[in-house]
Amino acid sequence: MKLYMSIKSVLFTISGICLSVLLLMGVSLYHQINDVSYYSDIIQYLARIGQDVLVRHTIAELLLDALILFTICRNSWRIYKQWFLTRKWRQYFSQRIHWEKTYLYNRKYRRWNTEIVIIRDPTFVAITMGLLQPKIILSTGALELLNQSEQRAVILHEVYHCQGKDTLKHFLIYLVEYGLMYIPVIKQLAEYYRARTEILADRFSIDQTGASSGLSSALLKVLRTQNNGQLAKVGINFTESAINYRIMQLLDLDNPVRIPVKVHWKPMVYSILVMLSILLVVTVNCTT
Ligand SMILES: [Zn+2]
């Protein structure tokens, strides 16, 4: 099934699902903690809660606890991994900064008020990195591969990601998708969101440069080169996703590209069942 939704409604749906599940889990935890009266010794207090959960709670409630624990562990692991990878790549980049070119490119593109860092690296690197203060990382390999108009098109594409704080938004959506993997419909909504962002970044680049030729030839050149796949995990790569839709847009600029949210029945039914089960367990256990 193909649904045509706006980017705002997709964001709203993802946030709605995430908040509903977190709220239900929160209510369940609150209810279980409140089952045991407060005790000043924290170790004994926690032991009493544990005992109460194991002895007095139903299998369904225990399963929900396991799901809550699974979600917390999975997201904590992803946050740690993001922190570790960002640190690793930041160190790698900081040792290779081409100061002269970094100065020149920041001067050239100062109008956009976005930090650009040029690194000495023969491979193609064009990425937006940093959750709170995103910056554009470009390699000397990328600058050698692209001519002036192509460089401008790629930089403006990345400027769009920086100004829209897309790295932070993508990371949060990825956390929801990864942590709530038992609600598979989120994955399909997240894929749409990523594709739509790429289309909007390309459109911004075309509008600002006044032509699509720079972006088209840059995209073709980059697709022929080998990207570092690891980098996609720490930021937004220039060729990360939605290549087909991006090419469609470049071939027909007058007609806006319509990206469908591809919702398959199985993940949809499965997601609804999981959410209803959580709702049922919380309602039954917190009202009896
Ligand atoms: Zn992009």
Image (cartoon, helix red, strand yellow):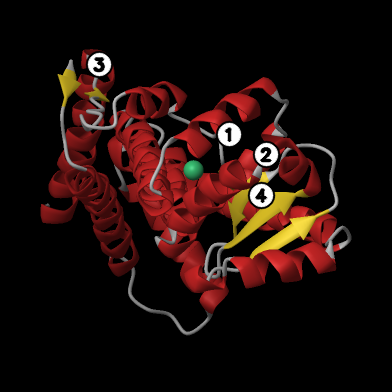
Residue 146: image tag: 2
Residue 73, visible in the rendered structure: no
Left or right: residue 85 compared with residue 158:
right
Mark 3–mark 4 distance (CA, rounded to whole Å):
30 Å
N-terminal of the two: label 4 or label 2?
4
Expressed as whole percent of the image width and height from the top left, the position of residue 250 reads: 38, 29
N-terminal of the two: label 1 or label 2?
2
Mark 2–mark 3 distance (CA, rounded to whole Å):
40 Å
Label 4 environment density (alpha carbons within 10 Å; few <14, some 14–19, many ≥20): some
Expressed as whole percent of the image width and height from the top left, the position of residue 197 reads: 37, 44
Above-or-below relation of 99 to 249: below
| Residue type at tag 4 | Lys
Residue 264: image tag: 3
Mark 1–mark 3 distance (CA, rounded to whole Å):
34 Å
| Residue type at tag 2 | Leu
Q: Which residue lies under the disc numbered 4?
A: 81
N-terminal of the two: label 2 or label 3?
2
